[in-house]
Image (cartoon, rainbow, N blue to C red):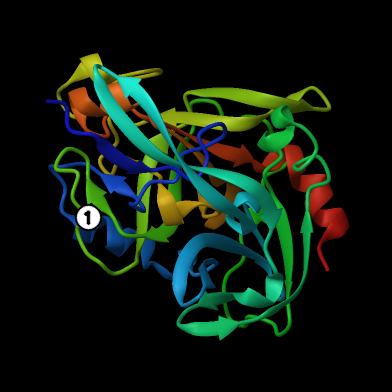
Amino acid sequence: MKIPIYIFLLNLTFWTTLLFGGVIRDDININEYTSLANQSRFDCVGEIIRDKEVVGSCVLIDENCVISTAHVFIEHNFKSDTMQIDGQTIIANVPYNDHVGDLKNYSFRFKGKIYSAKKMLIHPLYLDTIPNRDCDIIIITLNTPVKKVPLPILSNTFDELHSTIIGVGYGKPAYATNKEIITDKSLKIAGENVIDSITGFEIEGEKSILMSDFDSPGLNKFNITGDSLPKNLEYLCSGGDSGGGAFKASNDRLVLVGLTAITNFDIQQQARSGYYGQTMGFLRISVFQKWILNNKK
């Protein structure tokens, strides 16, 4: 008798929001990831809270302005659906009736302090058609400024390919193959990866998504793209990481090159290797830099 597998998917078409927030190597202690995340240079990465729960991450780009991925603010109704994978019945909660949430129900936390917001602007192409979901970006104006936080530079170059980035966000982290949440608390996690390819919807001739895969130590067969050698703090973004930052260092300042936007979750690959071999995508800041600067207040 086949036992149904129950999974929770927030969006089957564009991204999969998992229960975890930051999936890490099995052979590296979680403390190395949290220590990196808690460096003061990453204080610009904050939490997005709704109903007292962390639902996403965001990046402070000015004292009263944050950016994040728009899908964090898209709310849904759900219905059950089934699918067959490797002879097993998968029962999924599939979203419908997508709509933008009320900003007053969201708050933003930096360094333990809560901030409210007065205005949000979603990229005009985001809600247009399916391909334009790669324009998954929102600008939020806070009611009060966030003081004494070092601000990143917004990338305006297109040289991200093969670059090493540090991704920072919030969530309940998990090790790659034990598939268990390390803690019930939301933690700030930072991990490393390499930009292996650039894809997605094009704006003015430039593609909008930076892609990476989650490489496994010693198991090259799970490499999907690019170099199979994992970084020391190799990680896969997931869940609450949405809207967090992907950074490069330049002259002692952080350059924000991406926002965590996509986890492509292959169930068959997960059965073989846990979370190794899955891929993730970052919204490419250089493509949206002019739009951000023209619209932030």
Give the image quarter of residue 14.
top right
* Quarter of the rendering containing residue 114: bottom right
- Residue 111: horizontal and vertical position, in percent? 47, 79
Q: Which residue is painted at 60% across and 44% down in the image?
A: 96
Q: Residue at x 16, y 47 (%)?
A: 28
Three-letter code for the amino acid on which mark 1 is drawn? Ile
Q: Is residue 292 above or below residue 84?
A: below
Q: Position of residue 123 (x, y in %)?
A: 79, 48
Task: Tell me the crowding category of disc 1: few under 14, some 14 to 19, or many 20 or more residues within 10 angstroms, Cα based.
Answer: some
In the picture, measured across the screen, residue 205 lies left or right of residue 131, that is right
Q: Quadrant of the C terminus?
A: bottom right
In this picture, is 63 found above or below 279? below
Q: Residue at x 57, y 70 (%)?
A: 150
The quarter of the picture where residue 282 lies is top right
Residue 254, can we see it? yes
Query: Residue 278 versus residue 129: which sits nearer the camera?
Result: 129
Direction from residue 245 to residue 102 in the image, left or right: right
Q: In the rendered view, would you say 258 is above or below 32? A: above
Residue that carries the numbered disc 1 in the rendered image: 181
Question: Is residue 168 among the parts visible in the rendering?
Answer: no
Q: Secondary structure at mark 1?
A: loop
Residue plotted at (44% across, 71% down) = 53
